[in-house]
Amino acid sequence: MTTSPLKDLDQQVESLLATIGALTDAEALREAEPSITGKRSILSTLQKSLGSLEPEARRDAGAELQEARRIVEAALDSRRAELALVARSQALASDRIELGDVVVENVRWPVNAGHPSLVASTQRRLEDVFVAMGFRVSEGPEVESDWYNFEALNIPPAHPARGLWDTFYVELGDPETVVLRTHTSPTQVHLMESAVRSNALPIHAVMPGRCFRRDAPDARHLATFHQIEGLVVDRGITFADLAGVIETFTRAFFGADISSRLRPGFFPFTEPSAEFEITCTICHGEGCRTCSQTGWIELGGCGMLDPAVLDAVGIDAEEWSGFAFGFGIDRCAQMRHQIADMRALIENDVRFLRQFS
Ligand code: DAH
């Protein structure tokens, strides 16, 4: 009786599996593969040796050998997959940022993280200045009824002052009753109403937000722009308080070399009203093209609350008085950073934005 050529098969398979397990990368696996399953491998050599067996023994041995080959090939495949995974996670480990629960993979350095828009960072700075002065920050809706945007602000239908605001109307309800707010002043009305409802007077608040006008964009105007509104309702408030707040704000935001002045103006919701100007930041008051040689730049409007507005929201004008102001955030960004054309603010060109901290 001849000894079976497969008598050591189990050990041989064990040894092949150990070899496969010890392969440490895809390259080593590719190199070792011919010696494990190729023509010169032990499995192929054994296959050839079966030819000398009797037919029946050959069939049994053939089946045994085939099973051994299947096991070895499966081990090779799974090691290949494992090594690919290891390689991938090693690559990712160096191209990976973990931000709390969020993991960003495949990061290519240097990361282009973008930049806050200049309007957003200007708004945050403005809020900081006013919060430091004791104001709180509040927001209102961008789509308003005619009542909030105009009527409650003492601008009745067909009042000529409506021409000051070129309005976008929304097709909702009766024609021309719903508008995209043309200024942040309607937020004053919401705030006063809710203060009356919850008995929360006095009010010292600023209200930043987006506004819309049917203006053709140019170097100093955008059809979608931003304002910040201020509102104080308290006892014994005078025009001197208003002027003091405006001047304190101007120096805190633009710097000690820039000051403010108030010029008589007209707004239906304040009486008296004023236009609020600051020293031109381009020429520092010398006079230049930007300020039309006046040395001053108009930033917004302000005034003492008209008793008709207090009446409209149910605040007793005998007991309470106050002031309001509103000015452009985009204009502040333009003046603070001396930006010639305001349209640069909405182009979101990161090369432009990177100039600003
Ligand atoms: N809402 C006015 C505008 O957009 C600016 C303004 C003027 C706001 C006087 C006020 C104010 O609060 O009292 O032109």
Image: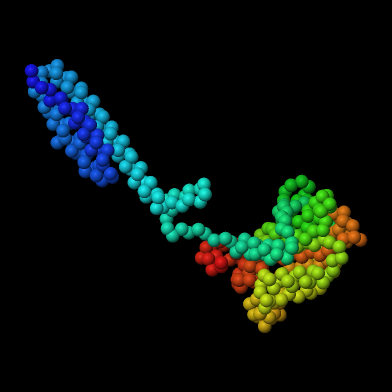
For residue 50, side relative to residue 204 (left or right): left
Q: 44 or 351: which is nearer to us?
A: 44
Q: How is the image coloured?
A: rainbow
Q: Residue furthest top?
A: 56
Q: Quadrant of the C terminus?
A: bottom right
Residue 143: give x, y in percent of width and height: 72, 52
Q: Residue furthest bottom?
A: 286
Q: Is residue 270 visible?
A: no
Q: Quadrant of the N terminus?
A: top left
Q: Residue at x 87, y 65 (%)?
A: 236
Q: 157 or 319: which is nearer to us?
A: 319
Residue 62: give x, y in percent of width and height: 18, 23
Q: Is residue 69 above or below residue 134?
A: above
Write down the quadrant of residue 241 in the picture: bottom right
Residue 316: give x, y in percent of width and height: 90, 57
Q: Residue at x 58, y 66 (%)?
A: 344
Write down the quadrant of residue 234 in the picture: bottom right
Residue 87: give x, y in percent of width and height: 34, 46
